[in-house]
Amino acid sequence: MSFLSRIIFVGSILITIFCGTNIALAQESRSIDGTRNNLSNLSLGSVGQQYSRIAAANYADGIGEIQSDLPNPREVSNILFDQESSIEDQNNLSDFNWSFGQFICHDIDHVEYNTDEQIEFSVPEADNFFDVGSTLPYNRRFYDPNSGNAQLGPRQYQNLTTAFIDGSGIYGADEQRASWLRTFEGGKLKTSDGNYMPWNTESGEYNSLKDINAPMMKHQPGESNQKLFVAGDTRVNKNPAIIALHTVFLREHNRLCDELADANPNWSDERLYQRARKMVGAYIQKITFMDWLPSLGILLEDYTGYNPSIDPTISNEFSAAGIVFENTLMGAEMLRLDNSGNLIPKGGLQIGEDYYYEPTTLFLDGIDCYLKGMSTQVQQQFDTKASTVLRNFDFSDDSTLAYDLVADRIYSGRDRGLPSYNEVRRNLGLPSFSTFSNLTGGNSDVADKLEAMYTSVDQLDLWVGLLAEKKLTNSIMGEVISNIIEDQMRNLRDGDRFYYRNDTQVFSLYDIQEIENTTLHDIIARNTNITIMQDNVFSAADHKDIANGPSLTAIHLEAAIYPNPTSNGWITLKLHSDFQVDCVFTILDILGRPLVTEQLELRSGDNFIKMNLNLHKITRGYYLGNIESNNYSNTITFIVE
């Protein structure tokens, strides 16, 4: 029996029925803005809170002036990060690693640009893309107005989203945006044609006039009148990978609402919304801590419970350096593959103007080809290299829009007053490095380039040092970045009262087991037409190497059901037919009574049909699956746990 069918509401009390025992517990949901998580400090981790610092702010004047004695960021980009050809990850990690990392970054961290405080840095000599003598513009980040002067101390920055891993990128972090995204019917979120996020238009559909009252969304430089998808996070249109991940979790929310409403017809819109939101947040947490972080080589100790003394606040070092490593992991294009593992007719998507903040590209392609491509494509190596296309943007041939993602990342660390790499080591209780060779673990090429640009290791930009440091055993990362990410993620887990394993007012042990058995593959399979994808999407797998269920003998209507037994309410029916044929698939209970009948059109070869058993009220037990055409039939036994 699905856990969704074991929960009912009576008044304001939640009744969980499990193994014949009734347990009455009060329902409680997260606030949208993150307040009231810690009952002793109601604002801890909420929107607008200042970032913490691992080490003291590093400004030339101690207040907010950017250090001027550091190497030109564009020169660092050119000398150290230039990468003309692909350098694939040696651990065979897929593009889901950097894309899900960006998805989580947007969920917990947001500092906005201040277009009224623009500065420039020069293009160095011998630049191979931008005109020598020209400049690259840089917008400084907004800082807390209650900082940044002699009386109040150095600039401090405010997190514009909640610190908690709570799905705020999907639902919003303020009531106005959260309300705009809701239908207020059946607990569901708004969608547009094709089951995508709503557009910022009057009707929410693409073919409609832009709505000036729609929530603000970040757009491509120079294109303020763009039609964009609207989500809980303003940066959702940044690239197809982020759009695709947001879309599958949006669909999962609405899918859960259908299940909940079917199991609990008396639930209100608010109860359906909050319960589905809680489930989606739990799935994201589980995937983050049990699947994504281990793929990077970061293993937290076992969870022992919520600790209200732990501060979940995001640190500047994590925000501006530790979590923003996608630039080195992204390739020059995204694969776009169909369900059979073949390139779609358009081919791959080259990174460029049609990639950044251009959602119509994905809208025309659909999300499936991007997700399938991300699972197949090996990400780039974690190092001090970045694809040339990421460093050389020149939108619309407008020099004011020239952009280098790597130089911008280096300069943003200085803008935020990040301490040097060695200073962070010291504050983490680690010994300093006296030579670049020691830092890089003997990589003389990187060490020599660093020494040519920086006067000493004590001057090294934190973000550059994190990418250059020697890698730990069984990890794609080095010691300092692993420490920064591990400490921050542990605090987000242990300092969150609503972490799913602590949220026992709602989740039973059975529910937690189901959450922990859910992978990102499962979320994708439930909400797309992709039928063949590896279970661990963080490890790249070529289509031909992916197990797609039991092998079938090449005879007409040979059939199998997998997984068998199934526990998540989904099965895939695999059928082989020697020729195109119409047939009927029937699910019968153990007494032979038909429960579900589906008309199927099979093509020649292997066919894959996904079924949601929850929609048909198929609960625990033994069942028969009967497949029948005019001249042949086959029966399969399967189990639902």
Image (spheres, helix red, strand yellow):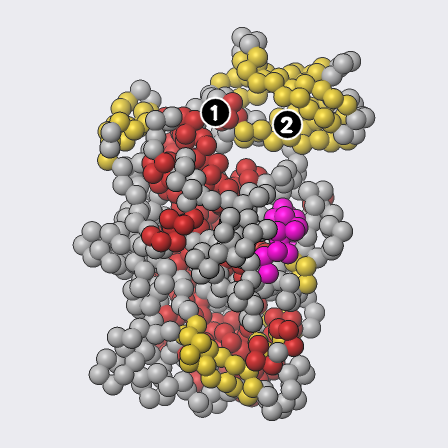
Residue that sits furthest to the right in the current view: 579
Q: Is residue 615 visible?
A: yes
Q: Secondary structure at mark 1?
A: loop
Q: Which residues are magenta?
A: 358-377
Residue visible at 45% across and 81% down in the picture: 118
Q: Amino acid at mark 2?
A: Leu
- x and y percent of residue 425 in the render? 38, 74
Q: Main secondary structure of the magenta part?
A: helix
Distance between the alpha carbons at the discs numbered 1 and 2: 17 Å
Is 475 or 151 nearer to us in this picture?
A: 151
Q: Which mark is residue 641?
A: 1
Q: Amino acid at mark 1?
A: Glu
Q: Which mark is residue 229?
A: none
Near mark 1 (Cα within 10 A), the count class, few <14, some 14-19 or many ≥20, is some
Is 437 or 279 nearer to us in this picture?
A: 279
Taking the magenta stretch, the answer to whether it contains residue 153 is no
Residue position marked by numbered label 2 in the rendering = 573
Taking the magenta stretch, the answer to whether it contains residue 364 is yes
Give the mark toward the camera: 1 or 2.
2
